[in-house]
Amino acid sequence: MQRLVSGAVAMATSAVVMIAVAGCSSTHSSKPVAPELSGHEIGWLCAMLDYEGTNPDYVPRAIRPVQNSKVHVTYEYQVSYNVEGETAWDLVNPFILVGVAKSKDNVGVSGRVRISIDGSDFSKTYDDGVVLDKKKFLFSEGDTLTEMRRSALIQLRDSMDQKLLGDRSVLSGVGIECGSE
């Protein structure tokens, strides 16, 4: 009987250790990672940029801000947070010891790029969004909300770059490309 009990204790201990290592939090994205832009894909869209943000790293890299252009680009985004707090149940919940998440946090980012040309009826809008979520476990809280926000904004930027690149021939056809003005 003592051998059976010590075997069960050893299994339970190893299970807790494995969960402590494997049950660590990680952040998951609603979008696959966009491919990196090559040199000729960066800064090909010259336009007057209307961007109210403070960090230029979040602006799609296809856009090259210039002065006195007939092409206008507006880039805007909104960030939302959904944070679940811990409850009193977490203190006594036995499932938390075996790797069940305590809570989950989400960061959602939606963005819009609007392109227009002075003296023309041409207007094009690109909308996209990214949601990052993470589960918090007993042994790991995971990324901070600030880290999640930055990552989501970078993913949104890269996704917008891919959309703009996908329409490059259309945009070039109406004169929206550096050197075509």
Image: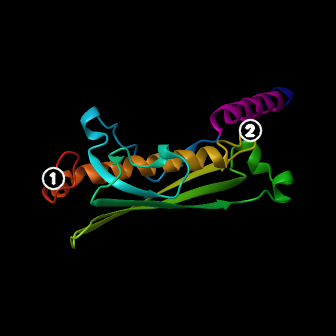
Badge 1, how many Cα within 10 Å: few under 14, some, many 20+? few
The furthest residue to the left:
173
User: Which label number is shown at residue 91?
Assistant: none
Q: Is residue 18 above or below residue 54?
A: above
**Location of residue 107 in the rendering, given as x and y in whole percent from the top left corner:** 58, 56
Which residue is at a point 25% across and 49% down the rendered structure image? 165
Circle 2 SS class: loop
Magenta range: 5-24
The answer to whether mark 1 and mark 2 are in CB contact below 8 A is: no
Residue 69: in magenta span? no
Badge 2, how many Cα within 10 Å: few under 14, some, many 20+? some
> Which part of the image, by quadrant, shows the N terminus?
top right
With 169 as the anchor, is 8 left or right in this view? Answer: right
Between the residue at mark 1 and the residue at mark 2, the CA separation in whole angstroms equals: 50 Å
The front one of 69 and 16 is 69
Rendering colour mode: rainbow
Which residue is at a point 45% across and 47% down the rendered structure image? 155
Residue type beneath disc 1 = Ser
Circle 1 SS class: helix
Residue type beneath disc 2 = Phe
Which residue is at a point 82% across and 28% down the rendered structure image? 6
With 111 as the anchor, is 105 left or right in this view? Answer: right
The secondary structure making up most of the magenta span is helix
Badge 2 is on which residue?
139
**Location of residue 160 in the rendering, given as x and y in whole percent from the top left corner:** 36, 53
Q: Is residue 12 above or below residue 48?
A: above
The furthest residue to the bottom:
121
**Location of residue 4 in the rendering, given as x and y in whole percent from the top left corner:** 79, 30
User: Which label number is shown at residue 169?
Assistant: 1
The front one of 103 and 107 is 107
